[in-house]
Image (cartoon, grey):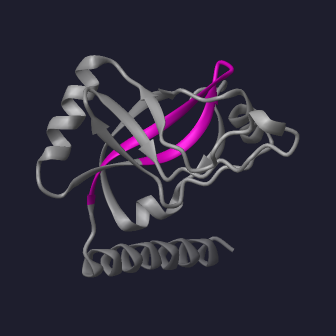
Amino acid sequence: MADTDKTISANRKAYHNYQILETVEAGIALLGTEIKSIRMGRVSLGEAYARPEKGEVWLWNANIPRYDSGGYMNHDPMRPRKLLLHKGQILYLAGKVSERGFTIVPLRLYYKKGRVKVELGLARGKKQYDKRETIKAKEAEREMDRALKSAHR
């Protein structure tokens, strides 16, 4: 992450529910009131996912609430939003998603050089036992860190 990147929203649930295999940076086509709402920090990627359709990739279920001062020009909070990717990236992601078990999950929304970008993760869903193993590994790492801290005191 460069110095100019500032995270707006992160999808922490994605790392728990999915095994992230690759990440891709994408631009996002937004309306004016959506930008203003994002600048207020009001965005949720919790249930969001991306899906390729007809040679384009769309972001679904990303909740950007209405801008309070938007008036009649306000946007629909749950509308699908077009993601801006190169043709090769779109074809690659579409090919991977057509394979069984792969999905595209937005990991975080951030500013890069004044533009809003989305970090997409090519992911495979975790089974319940995989989630338990991840939790056990994190707890073991914490225990080791605690033991090292107490040993240095």
Compared to residue 27, the image places residue 34 above or below, namely: below
Could you say which is closer to the camera, residue 9 or residue 62? 62
* Quadrant (top left/top right/bottom left/bottom right) for the N terminus: top right
* Left-right relation of 79 to 60: right
Q: Is residue 66 magenta?
A: no
Residue at 61% x, 54% y: name it: 44
Residue at 24% x, 35% y: name it: 93
Q: Position of residue 70 (x, y in %)?
A: 82, 37
* Quadrant (top left/top right/bottom left/bottom right) for the C terminus: bottom right
Residue at 23% x, 20% y: name it: 88
Q: Position of residue 84 (x, y in %)?
A: 43, 24
* Left-right relation of 110 to 23: right
Name the residue at the right extreme.
69
Q: Quadrant of residue 111?
A: top right
* Left-right relation of 21 to 140: left
Could you say which is closer to the camera, residue 43 or residue 60? 60
Magenta segment's dominant SS is strand
Compared to residue 47, the image places residue 8 above or below, namely: above
Q: Magenta residues? A: 106-124
Q: Quadrant of residue 5?
A: top right
Name the residue at the front extreme.
72
Could you say which is closer to the camera, residue 118 or residue 29? 29
Q: Is residue 114 magenta?
A: yes
Compared to residue 106, the image places residue 33 above or below, namely: above
